[in-house]
Image (spheres, grey):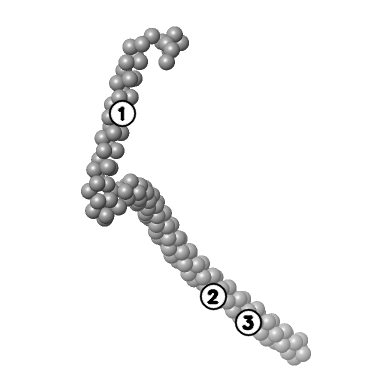
């Protein structure tokens, strides 16, 4: 009788050890899984924070880029205006060059010659204007002979 009792105790002890090992493995697995889940959650939180920071940085850069584009357009407009003013100034300088040359020489005869040329061109314009007025009183060109 001792032998079945001994076998029974041995079997019970073995089953107890196996059960304890199983429960221990289960507890370790659960703890390990919880740790992994916690690590994953921390990683997700960190990545979300980084993503939000990058998104706000992107928005700041886009806003800065829009400001730079509008500034560039404003400067291009100013440059175009400056180029137009420069061209007008160069034309004016070119038109005033003969007068500057005359003033440098101090030649009064040349000044009076220039004035006569201006007066002559004015009188020529007046004569042409008067002739146009006279022609407008004439019959149509088809019957008018020059």
Q: Dot 1, crowdedness within 10 Å: few (<14), some or many (≥20)?
A: few
Marks 1/3: CA distance?
A: 123 Å
Q: Which numbered disc, 2 or 3, marks the residue that appears first in the sequence?
A: 3
- Residue located beneath label 2 in the image: 35
Give the camera-side residue of 95 and 15. 95
Q: Which numbered disc, 2 or 1, marks the residue that appears first in the sequence?
A: 2
Image point 30% across, 52% down: which residue? Answer: 101
- Residue located beneath label 1 in the image: 125
Whether the residues at callouts 2 and 3 have beta carbons within 8 Å, the answer is: no
Residue 27: quarter of image: bottom right
Image point 26% across, 38% down: which residue? Answer: 116
Q: Along the horizontal axis of the image, is 125 left or right of 31? A: left
Q: Nearer the viewer, mark 2 or mark 1?
A: 1
Q: Nearer the viewer, mark 1 or mark 3?
A: 1
Residue 23: quarter of image: bottom right
- Residue located beneath label 3 in the image: 20
Image point 54% across, 75% down: which residue? Answer: 35
């Amino acid at each position: 009788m001792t032998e079945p009792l001994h076998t029974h105790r041995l079997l019970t002890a073995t089953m107890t050890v196996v059960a304890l090992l199983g429960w221990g493995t289960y507890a370790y697995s659960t703890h390990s899984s919880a740790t992994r889940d916690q690590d994953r959650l921390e990683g997700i939180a960190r990545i979300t924070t980084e993503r939000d920071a990058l998104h706000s940085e992107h928005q700041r850069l886009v806003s800065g880029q829009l400001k730079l584009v509008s500034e560039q357009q404003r400067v291009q407009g100013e440059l175009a205006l400056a180029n137009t003013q420069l061209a007008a100034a160069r034309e004016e300088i070119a038109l005033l060059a003969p007068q500057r040359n005359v003033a440098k020489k101090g030649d009064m005869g040349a000044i009076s010659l220039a004035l006569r040329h201006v007066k002559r061109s004015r009188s020529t314009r007046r004569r042409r204007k008067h002739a146009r007025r006279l022609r407008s009183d004439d019959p149509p060109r088809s019957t008018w002979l020059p």
